[in-house]
Amino acid sequence: MQGVTGRMFHASSGLGDQSLLALLAAAILAAGAMVILVRGARMLGRARDTIAELRAALASTNELRDEVETILDRLPDAVVQCDGHGHVLASNQAYEDLLGARQRGAEAALPEVVERRTPELLPDGTRRMEEAIRTERGIRWFSWVERDIVAPDGSTTILRSGREITNLIESEKALDDARAKAEAASEAKSRFLATVSHEFRTPLNGILGMSDLLLDTALQPEQLAYVQALRGSAEAFLSLIEEILDFSKIEAGRIDLICEPFELETLVQGVVELLAPRAQDKGTEIASFVSRDVPRLVRSDRDRLRQILFNLAGNAVKFTGSGGVCIAVEPGGPGEIVFSVEDTGPGIPAERLGTIFDEFDQGGLEAARGTGTGLGLAITRRIVARMGGRIEVESTVGHGSVFRVRLPLAAAETSPEAVGDALNLRVLLVGPSPFEPRCIERRLAEAGAETARAADAARAGEILRGARFDVLIADAALGEAEVRQLARAAKDSGVARTVVLLSPFERRDFGSPHAAGYDAFLIKPVRTHSLLERLRPMAGPRREPAVEANPSAPAAVSVGPLRVLLAEDNEVNALLAMRLLQKLGVLVDWARDGIEAAAQAEAALAGERPAYDVILMDMRMPGLDGAEVTRRIREREAAIGRDDRVRIVALTASMIGGRERYTETAGFDGFLLKPFTFEALAVELRGKAPQNAVA
């Protein structure tokens, strides 16, 4: 065995060095090949795994795509993707069903847009728009939301989502058509009201004006009664017309508010004084109280506030058979003023309080209220709401009602407080009336006086025997015998000053206050200023004016030597206006129609006749209307370079548009609504009166 091994060793050793190296290289190459084969096998396995993963991912992507497509197809909104050339790249079933766009790619284009509204760009870059599109079912409206989608390669596509709004658009168009028809109907209604207003108010202007001229003449008692009845009926008719026209104007949204400063107490006293004759004719009273805690000057619409108070107080006077009515003004919440109108009338049933402000409702008191439209409270509520306030009512059947209006009225920038010395006086007030003595008592208390009140002479005598007073104020409504008895009792008790309260009717029948034992008198309803002026001079010489002016009587007015052109085609109204103008001391020429008015104005501007200071221009005249005549006058003035243009005042019986319609847009300088009063005419003329004119 050993021998054999030795032979093999030696045989191998005999191969030589080169053969050994070759053998070694072959072994190395074989080993390298094995490594490559192993690594290749591993890489092949990994590739197979990657392919499997890719196949799984592709399958998942396809599933996800199918799910997304299924979701998109189930959406009620149409979804479409298109390129920048308007070719459809993808869409959902809703888009295809609605628009019939079943092709995609270069052959499929977006449908024709018939009408497009202005797009809206949202902050995130999204666009919102509405389009009318031509579809297989005709033209349909869609609301779209779209945005740009930028691909990694920089290409841009547009993704849109929208839904059909055809019914909504048709409803909007129907609403617009209805609105246009309503506006046209409202405009026709306004024109009709303007015509009706003119046709009604023009003859009423003649009736009321001629009644005033008759009342200024010497009439027998029977004639005087007839004329007063005539005027009263005309005023009632005018009131009804104004209610109906005013309600129509408010209903049409044509009520405009003016903000200007005015004195609150003066306005309230003016309303009370206008209603006083009506109340006194019925044997009732009307009084007022304005607290010192409210601003003396406020900023608001004076005319609308007067209308509110006049409606409420006038309504109260109308159905209050005994007792009276009181307007009180006191502070409410922050920046709020409360106007209360209280009466002693029959009251309003509780079941009717919820409808008392409805149109044509009279609160279940038709018999007590007499004639009327039932619009007064409805108008009042709408005006109060327009002024930013609210109205409330409390009432008990058999005990009267209280209406409260709460308005946000701001104090005027310059609202000086009335300053006066405190009344260090003790005052006894005696009267059966429910409101006037109470209001006087509150005024005197605010002025610093101490007061006591009695309802009759017997109770007043007891008070006088138990205390000392400086002033006695007695209401003539007690009766002449009791009033005279009170005067004697007051003198016996050492009262320094006695004042009797008289209505204008009582003043005529009462005789001399001095003969009845009184030092002074005051006319009801009593003004605060008059009351305090009667009491403050007690420390000095006592002086009483011969009479206290009737607040409703017109003052003598003169506007100076003006020359006026009156353009008026109605002969009765022209006669009335000329008589009023002559009373004002002016020279007047009459033009019977628009053509004659234009000719006379042209002649005056050309210097062919004396120049006019004022032209009173009726708006409705044959030939040329007032607006056209005024336009020609203004053009002629501009042509000749006249700086000081003639004052032109519009005369109209139409309430539509109001003062602003004429003074701001039509070239007029003033405005008079027929029937106009003597005082209103004087005010409009006074705008052109010379410096030496007096009023």
Image (spheres, rainbow, N blue to C red):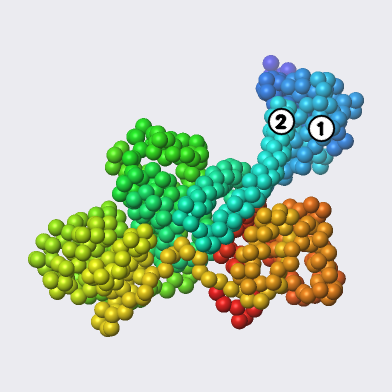
Q: Are dots 2 and 1 in contact, CB under 8 Å?
A: no
- Side of 571 relative to 82 (left or right): left
Quick one: label 2 or label 1, which is nearer the N terminus? 1
Q: What residue type is labelled 1?
A: Cys
Q: What residue type is labelled 2?
A: Ala
Spatial distance from mark 2 to mark 1, Cα to Cα?
Answer: 34 Å
Report the residue that reaches farthest toward the top. 1
Which residue is rendered at x = 45% and y = 66% of the image?
Answer: 263
262 lies above or below 174: below
- Front in this rendered view, residue 16 or 102: 102
Report the residue that reaches farthest toward the right. 107
Q: Mark 1 points at which residue?
A: 82
Which residue is rendered at x = 71% and y = 55% of the image?
Answer: 571
Task: Estimate the x, y position of residue 117 in percent, counting from the top left.
Answer: 77, 39
Which residue is rendered at x = 42% and y = 35% of the image?
Answer: 366
10 Å crowding of disc 2: few (<14), some (14-19), many (20+): few
Q: Is mark 2 on a helix, strand or loop?
A: helix
Which residue is rendered at x = 42% and y = 68% of the image?
Answer: 549
Task: Estimate the x, y position of residue 276 in percent, counting from the top left.
Answer: 40, 56
| Quadrant occupied by the N terminus | top right
| Quadrant occupied by the C terminus | bottom right
530 lies above or below 271: below
Q: Can residue 287 be seen in this view?
A: yes
Q: Is mark 1 on a helix, strand or loop?
A: strand
- Side of 260 relative to 622 (left or right): left
Task: Estimate the x, y position of residue 283 in percent, counting from the top left.
Answer: 34, 50
Task: Name the disc covering residue 590, or none.
Answer: none
Q: Name the residue under label 2.
A: 174
